[in-house]
Amino acid sequence: MSASLETTEARAKAVERPPDSALRRFFDVNRAAVGTLVVFGVMIAIFMAASPTVFLHWPIYDSVLVTLPVALYLVVPLVFVVTVGEIDLSFPATMGFSAWIFALFVHFGLGPFLGIVAALATGMALGACVGALVVTAGLSSLVATLGMNFMLRGFIMIVTQGKSIALLELQDTTAGALFSGQVYNLPVQIFWALGFVVFASLLFNRHKFGARVRAVGDNPDSAGQMGVNVARVRIWTFVFMGLGAALAGVFSTMVNYTWWPTTGDGYLLPAIASVFVGGTPTWGGVGTIAGGAIGALTVSFIQSGIVAAGLSGFYVQFFNGLIIILSLLGHRWNQKRYR
Amino acid sequence: MPERLIELKNIAKTYGRVFAVGGVNFHIDRGEVVGLLGDNGAGKSTLIKMLAGAIHPTSGEILVRGKRETHWNAERSRNAGIETVFQDRALCVQQTITRNIFLGRELTRTLGFLDRKRERAEAERLMREIGFTSKVFTPDSIVGQLSGGERQGVALARAIYNNADLIVMDEPTTALSLTETEKVFRFVRAVRAGGRSVLFIGHNIHHVFDIAERFVVMDRGRVALQATKEEVGSAGRLIAYMERLAHPQGIEIPPSPGHRPEAAA
């Protein structure tokens, strides 16, 4: 009896005990996000050394703060989708479609606020459709969402015949100031986006929904046997993705007060890359919102940083890839996997 | 007459034309330990999964405390006071012990936000109650780090949290060490002493005979025998019965190649 207890203790010593100090526990729980932050810091340091004139002055940061919010609305919900064990490739088209609805509302004089509500409802409805295809119809999320992306984009192109919609009337309105103005000399979008990140982080880490998203991604059979409605959780993550895509669409349209039928194109791969650069693993069950946000920051900086540093645009792809590979290697070494 | 806790009436589960469970009548009273026995493929796991609401019966009725249940599912089963410790333990191994204990039954404050303080305190209490002797593990430990016996402990802790009336255990002692098995037995006796019921599924007939007071033997999707401990008498008789069930003609032991009849004489 005592012998067996001793072996348990000996084995237990080989296992890590969660640290007692609050600070160390914080680092332990957020190791992926902290790792991402380190990668980001190193990258910025290299940029500063390589091109001090650009990176020691404010304008580059200002331009990133305009493009970053749109990416955040996409990356953060995508962390939920990846954590629940699925993938969504349809969000660029959902983003364009919701922004289209917003543009049409404004264009026909129904006002920007009603337009935002309509856009968000559209995004959530499209997310529910994607969710129904994946969960109810049982299609692979990789293929079904790819199909949805093509189909929705094609639909937009057919109906609009590729024509954009100018919303210049929004300039100098309350909505324009609220969603595309300046606060303390900073782009106002970043405050909305940070608010969204904080909200999503609470939802993911401190809310029943986030707990169930992680449980379903970890082991759907176990979660189902314990009374979690697995299908409902999965569908809601797609709905949340649709909501994020709609927000991204509205905010990106507000930057230049123009909706293009291609709105959202070009966000697919950077957003997905940001999720994984941020330290969310591909296998589901665990994820990090903060890491995803820092990942989005990293990817945004590669894009604007390379060009601003005077290198040609050809370098962007190369460095994008380099950072992704290095980040994944870092996370591989940094994270523990349990199966 | 003790209260009839659960009653299954003519429960059947078919997959296409194959039936896994075909018309089973079965009940559990308050405060009894029932042993469910049967060979592999006899339908034990299918039966308890229907009881747990994890799969839907093709036909038949489920009555809880005499009331007929409709739209039976895992959530309703748990709300009705049935906790199941599944054979694979139904754990999410990348999550903490706390998250696993409150899986599907999170303690929340306003607007669905988790009451993490209360969850952690309750998890700590349950871990002590279930006998986590090692101080190494806290409620924040990841289940993937635990040994098989300790994982079983997490599953048991989850099952006792809600003071369930019936705890169903699907092969709880399989792949456990002797001391860990003894822990499971102590657990079953403690539950029984608290006036609650246990449905104990096992392959080791000696284990089941020791712990249960009534036996249900299943064979090819049907109930072959229901008997109390007195009626059965001994584990040996139970084993003999089950052997006859598996091999009605008796087992012919083939002679070994080197066997010579004259040597035996």
Image (cartoon, rainbow, N blue to C red):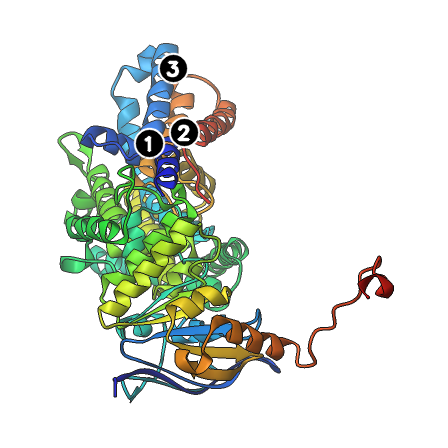
Spatial CA distance of label 2 from label 3 is 22 Å
Spatial CA distance of label 1 from label 3 is 23 Å
N-term mark: 2 or 1: 1
Q: What element carries label 2?
A: helix
What is the x, y in percent for residue B103? 31, 58
For label 2, the residue is A334
Q: Quadrant of residue A225?
A: bottom left
- Subunit of label 1: A
What is the x, y in percent for residue A327? 44, 28
For label 3, the residue is A46
**Which of the labelled discs sits on residue B119, or is there none?**
none
**Does the image show residue B91?**
no
What is the x, y in percent for residue A302? 41, 26
**Which of the labelled discs sits on residue A31, or is there none?**
1
The reply to whether label 2 and label 1 mark residues of one chain is: yes
- Subunit of label 2: A
The reply to whether label 1 and label 3 mark residues of one chain is: yes
- Subunit of label 3: A
Position of residue A202 relative to residue B7, above or below, is: above
Does the CB distance between marks 2 and 1 fall below 8 Å?
yes
What is the x, y in percent for residue A252? 32, 44
